[in-house]
Amino acid sequence: MAEHKKEKILGVKGMNDVLPDEAPLWELFENTVQAVLRSYGYQQIRTPIVEPTALFARGLGAVTDIVEKEMYSFTDSMNGDQLTLRPESTAGVVRSVLEHNLIYDGPKRLWYSGPMFRHERPQRGRYRQFHQVGAEAVGFSGPDIDAELIMMCQRLWDDLGLSDIRLEINSIGDAEERNRHRADLITYFEKNSELLDAEAKRRLQSNPLRILDTKNPAMQDLVNQAPKLLDYLGDASRAHFDGLQRLLNANNIRFTINPRLVRGMDYYNRTVFEWITDHLGSQGTVCGGGRYDPLIEIFGGKPSPAVGFAMGVERLLELMRASTGTISAGQCDVYLVHQGDAAQLQAFIMGERLRDAGLDVVLHCAAPGGAGSFKTQMKRADASGAAYALILGDDEMAKGEASIKHLREPDMTNNQRHIAFDQVVDYLIDQIVGDGDHDHGHLHAGQVHTHH
Ligand code: ATP
Ligand code: MG
């Protein structure tokens, strides 16, 4: 009978699987992030991945890259609602803060982590599902919290072992200051309109500030000579920016002022910053942030200042892969090898007792072809990365003793012991956790092996 082999269904382009080999690095990253954010008193907030499309259209500004062309928007076929897979999380967090009146009793330090979705051209460091970790400090007005957020990033880079990330900061003032600058900017670009590319021409009236952000090499001279927003700052914006720099300097945070630095979203004001590396090609920004004082009022809330950042997890992991070295992937302490029904039952019981004692244990289970010979099972034990194989067969069952084989012992003649069933847990705990002098290979995700 002719059977058609079914075609495989593949994942969505630009949306990646994190495979088991990679997961320990993610776990290390996530654990480190959590510890650093907690050490500054930030609380986690988890908002839905889907939000009303209107939230992003209103919050991000209609003429931003994201809203113009990158959003995964769809109509809920059940009720006609317009929905969008979140392209970033600030809008959702602010919505949630307002919906639940989280700042009724004072400002809040919040952080989040999770997948974001943007319909961009997939390439190195740019995916359609990617992950961000971000922090939002809502209800804080001064440069002190701006400095704190930046220092938190610096501590995270240090704890992750990343050294080559530099900080650029700028102030983009308030709306009135930007308007005066904007008028002069448009005049300047109009005078030089023959040097503008198509995208810049399109942006000239709608969002001329973004022209300064162009990556077009032919326009670099033009944007370098353009009127600088920093020269338009009033006293309050100036004092805020000076205050930030004072705090960064006093805390030994190195930075450069990039007068052309602007952020993609419309809602930013005053402080903006980016953390940049030269090791990821043109996708070198690993974290971007800034102050967005106007946003809460735009969302219908009582005016309240706020500031935050978002970092690109995939880009940071790529840097970690280069600097951190290998991380043990899903290794266990003990692999249980067994033959026969009685031995299988004993293996289940011992497995539970070893896990009760805190060890990570893999019990051999049947695959097509059966439970497998001792030889097959020992191969599996070796491949599992376990430090020990605990072997139960007819002999062991008859004597009431388990054979315990040290799989990492270079001295192959003397690497097997017979241990009475009721001594097995103590023996293995002693060997593996022991007096702490030896590395018995008891290493789990979240611990790093660095090689220099
Ligand atoms: P870019 O200029 O690279 O498009 P952006 O201004 O759109 O960045 P933000 O919206 O500020 O980026 O997001 C913060 C961070 O999230 C970025 O600095 C980057 O590290 C990461 N990021 C943004 N878009 C992607 C993507 N498509 N794939 C992977 N990471 C991304
Ligand atoms: Mg972008």
Image (tube, helix red, strand yellow):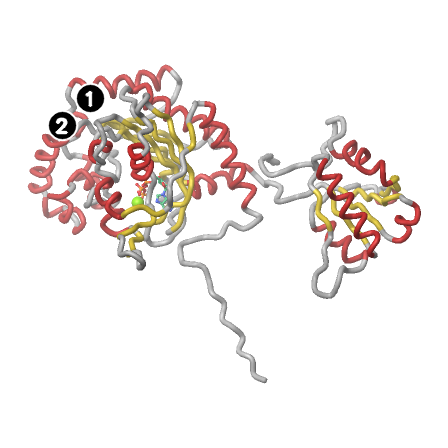
Quadrant in the picture for the C terminus: top right
Picture coordinates of residue 385, whole percent (x, y) = 69, 46
What amino acid is found at the position of numbered circle 2 in the picture? Glu
Secondary element under disc 1, as helix, strand or loop, is helix
Q: Quadrant of ligand 2?
A: top left
Judged left or right of residue 140, residue 381 is right
> Whole-percent x and y of residue 257?
28, 27
Residue toward you, 99 or 121: 99
User: Which residue bears the numbered disc 1?
Assistant: 237
Q: Is residue 263 left or right of residue 16?
A: left
Q: Amino acid at mark 1?
A: Ser
The answer for how far apart the CA atoms under marks 2 and 1 are is 9 Å
Q: What residue did someone put label 2 on?
A: 177
Quarter occupied by residue 211 = top left
Q: Residue at x 51, y 32 (%)?
A: 32
Relative placement, left or right, of 324 versus 334 is left
Give the residue at x 27% y 21%: 141
Look at the numbered discs 2 and 1 and tell me whether their residues touch, using CB distance below 8 Å: yes
Quarter of the view holding residue 415: top right
Residue 170: give x, y in percent of width and height. 26, 28
Residue 217 visible, this orientation = no
Mark 2 lies within 8 Å of ligand 1 (Cβ measured): no
Determine crowd level at label 1: few under 14, some 14-19, many 20+ residues with C-alpha closer than 10 A.
many
In the image, which disc is placed on residue 40? none
Q: Residue at x 58, y 35 (%)?
A: 446
| Camera sees residue 26 | yes
Q: Residues within 10 Å of mark 2 (few under 14, many from 20)?
A: some
